[in-house]
Amino acid sequence: MYFQADGNIEDLSIFKHKLVYKARNGGVGGRNKKHGFNAEALVIKVPVGTAIYVKEPDKDMLVLDLQKDGKKMLAAKGGKGGKGNVHFATATRKAPETFQPGETGEEYKVLLKIILPIDVGIIGFSNIGKSSLLAAVSAARPKIAEYPFTTTEPVLGVVDDGVKKYTWAEIPSMTAGSHEGKGPGNKYLHQASRAEVMIYLLEAFSQDVKKDLLQLRREVALFNTAITEKKAVVVINKIDMIENEIALEEIRWAMQNMEYDVYFISAKEKKGLKDLICGVHNLVTERKLQTAGESKHEVVYRPKPVDKGD
């Protein structure tokens, strides 16, 4: 059985009413030592960008990732055919009743998710200015309001630095306890899994910016540590609301010696955006060159079979 990406399919609604897919059985052997016919491979078509996970007791394991139209990958192998009695015949026993039955094919319980093809993911707590930042650097027009959790699904925008164009996405707001389902929870955080670079967005007038960063990273790590291992930058937004230059310098001092580059911006007044875009796009280009070399030899995942006793 194969999964194949098809650009003509827009969503996963086709799977709402059909949950079980089973390849046909092969044919039985015939007279005169003829073997049975092989069953035609089952090909299940899914939208481009579909990630296929095998459901296991402790976690869902990514096994296939179909990012290109037409890409087809093996999901489950059919069982090996059996042997008829002719294979067990001997000189003294020409018509034995012994035979070997065919094997059962692989069987899995899978979870399908569409993951957006983004280059940069913007993550931050509610009312931090993610929508304002995306609107300021791209032609995207996300809904912007003063109340929490305005954005309820990922919003994409194409950012052009004059040389390169990359896709940025605002990931819906997180909050302390997102991993426990508070607020929107981490429902959309998996959309950051394909991003090359992450932006951790904080606000300048916070009482403790560094603490906010640690809390934000903790929430992300509780969802998927692989996202926190991506290249990232820290962006301090709303510097226009800091009237005291000394207070701003204190934040700069507190953020020294970070493992990330730190940018100070005002999305509202479009301050500091040019340097931010340039720095982020350089990181994206660096990552794409690196991953291009890593993807020369494609990895085919072979998950463990699902326990039929479950």
Image (cartoon, rainbow, N blue to C red):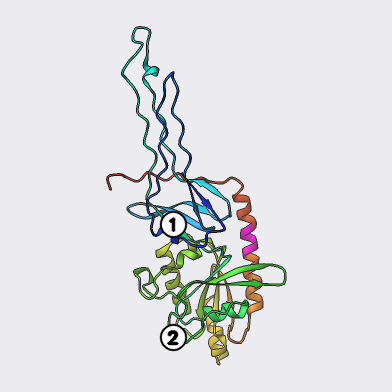
* Picture layout, residue 19 above or below residue 208: above
Report if residue 286 lies within the magenta region. Answer: yes
Compute the Cα span from label 2 to label 1.
32 Å
- Residue type for callout 2: Tyr
Percent of width and height locating residue 204: 52, 83
Asked whether 111 or 134 is in front, the reply is 111
Report if residue 234 lies within the magenta region. Answer: no
Identify the residue position indicated by label 1 in the image.
Answer: 112
Q: Which residue lies furthest to the left in this view?
A: 309
Residue 158 placement, left or right of 254 = right
Identify the residue position indicated by label 2 in the image.
Answer: 147
Task: Classify mark 2: residues with Cα within 10 Å, few (<14), some (14-19) or many (20+).
Answer: few
Q: Specify start and end residues of the magenta stretch as a single range.
A: 284-288
Q: Earlier in the sequence, mark 2 or mark 1?
A: 1
Residue 257 placement, left or right of 162 = left
Percent of width and height locating residue 78: 43, 38
Residue at position x 65%, y 62% in the image: 285
Q: Which residue lies furthest to the bottom in this view?
A: 243
| Labels 2 and 1 touching (C-beta < 8 A) | no
Can you tell which quarter of the image residue 183 is in? bottom left
Residue at position x 47%, y 82% in the image: 127
- Residue type for callout 1: Leu
Q: Is the magenta stretch mostly helix, strand or loop?
A: helix
